[in-house]
Amino acid sequence: MPVAPGARSGNCFVVEIVTFREQFAEAFASLNYEWIESTYGIEEHDREILDAPFEKIIKPGGQIFFALADDTVAGTAALENKGPDAFELVKMAVSPKFRGLGIGDRLMNACIEYALQAKRSRITLDSNTKQAAAICLYRKYGFREVPLDPNSPYSRVNIRMELAMPPGSM
């Protein structure tokens, strides 16, 4: 497993990416509630997903990934099933004490690999341009801006992006 340098202390962490386990559902919710509440305020659709991740993400055919740093949930990201050709990247968060260590990259790689294995042709996401670091991460991985979804359940959304999977990769 890759080792990431420890935040501030100089320690190293063994980082492992794992898929959904019920024991991590609370960390999925708390990491996302923390950043969403402090930046925008919680909306009803946030509560629906964060309070019932198995029912809203896993059961309908999506997946939730967790970055574990020495068995501590350092970050998370989810892929919501959007039909036979797409996933939507939702609820990506990295704990403040683990930021800058490549956790977001590891989660993004896991999401893309999963989508490819599931033979999806694209990953979409809705965000806000206030999330500059996240937007840079998405662009780094090839996401391009596309028109907003007029039916988005979030009032905070001001950018929609999409990653088209490379032809022949599915």
Image (cartoon, rainbow, N blue to C red):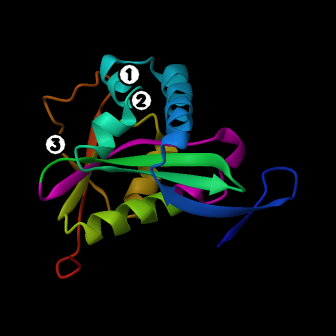
Q: Is 126 positioned to the left or the right of 120 in the image?
A: right
Q: Are marks 2 and 1 in contact (CB under 8 Å)?
A: yes
- Residue 77 image position (x, y, % from top left): 44, 48
On residue 153, the disc is none
Q: Which numbered disc, 1 or 3, marks the residue closer to the eye?
A: 1
Magenta region:
84-104
Q: Please tell me how crowded label 3 is: few (under 14), some (14-19), or many (20+) other residues with Cα within 10 Å.
A: few
Q: Residues within 10 Å of mark 2 (few under 14, many from 20)?
A: many
Q: Residue at x 39, y 37 (%)?
A: 129
Question: Which residue is tagged 2?
Answer: 50
Residue 70 left/right relative to 18: right
Specify the amino acid type for callout 3.
Pro
At label 2, which amino acid type do we have?
Answer: Leu
Above or below, comparing residue 61 to residue 167 in the picture: above
Say what amino acid the circle numbered 1 marks: Arg
Q: Is residue 90 magenta?
A: yes
Image x and y of residue 62, in percent:
29, 50
